[in-house]
Amino acid sequence: MKRTILFILSFAFVAVTINAQKIEFNHQTGKYLEIDGANIYYEEIENAGKPTLLFLHGGFGNIEDFNSVLSMFANDYHIVGIDSRGHGKSTLGTGKLTYKRLQLDVEAVVNHLQLNNIHIIGFSDGGVIAYRLASANNIPIRKIITIGATWSLSDAELVEKIMADMMTREGWKEIFNFYQLHNPEPNVDRPVEGVIEMWTDKTEDGYPLESVENITVPALIIRGNDDDSFPLESAVELASKIEKSVLFNIPFAPHDAHNKYPQMFETITKEFLNK
């Protein structure tokens, strides 16, 4: 029988902070791996003998988006961050941008670095990739943590409806400026078109769909209660399909719930990883 533990938080949360070494992704110390016509950028923050914590960012973002929470894990994990194809310092290549393509890129980096004992933290699109990676089971994953990560066709249709508003917000300007400044092939138009097409892709190369039922590793599904792109009903349905899942719904939190409440994120995430 499948068991799903559902946490919907509706009360004040008190977190205990700890002193941690200040670490950051910086887009200066990383390396490139050529994969199927694109140069995929990654950074490692080495911690010999420790399990790997792999960070996968969201659409139009890059690995620096995790800098607000990265130091929380500095003492306990070998940390790896990957800029998705067409994001950050990773080039786009000539092929179609799909979630499957990003999944294959991550698998190639993991195999290149010979990583084992992997935990994944994936935000938004990075979480979608985490579902696909765990479903495919081609690399040695122990646990996955997703934040605001959709999975179904109904989610894709919802994203399509709200996309016009998302693409006109002032906040995107800073993201595009970062891309233009850092990427070796800074043509913003093609990656933007590719991401929009990926978000609305309803083929088997897109969202994981029913394949999430193949996920056998423990999964922590984090959702901000004010996240319009990932409805609570969808999150509950997803949790019911992943046998070893925990759903944590954070009140008053937006899509990037980990940035809104970093101490809460730290406490819950570490509890999940250490069990």
Image: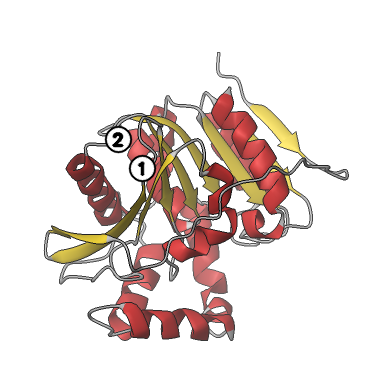
The relative height of residue 103 versus residue 24 in the rendered view (above or below) is above
Residue 136's tag is 2
Query: In the rendered view of the protein, which quadrant contains the C terminus?
Result: top right
The residue indicated by pointer 1 is: 132
Residue 104 locus on image (x, y percent): 23, 49
The scheme the figure's colours follow is secondary structure
Query: In the rendered view of the protein, which quadrant contains the N terminus?
Result: top right
Camera-nearest residue between 248 and 271: 271
Dot 1 amino acid type = Arg
Residue 101 locus on image (x, y percent): 25, 55
Residue drawn where x is 40% and y is 32% of the image: 51
Q: Quadrant of residue 114?
A: top left
Dot 2 amino acid type = Ala
Residue drawn where x is 24% and y is 60% of the image: 31
Residue 208 in view: no
Residue 107 locus on image (x, y percent): 25, 44
Dots 2, 1 in contact, CB < 8 A:
yes
The relative height of residue 257 versus residue 175 in the rendered view (above or below) is above
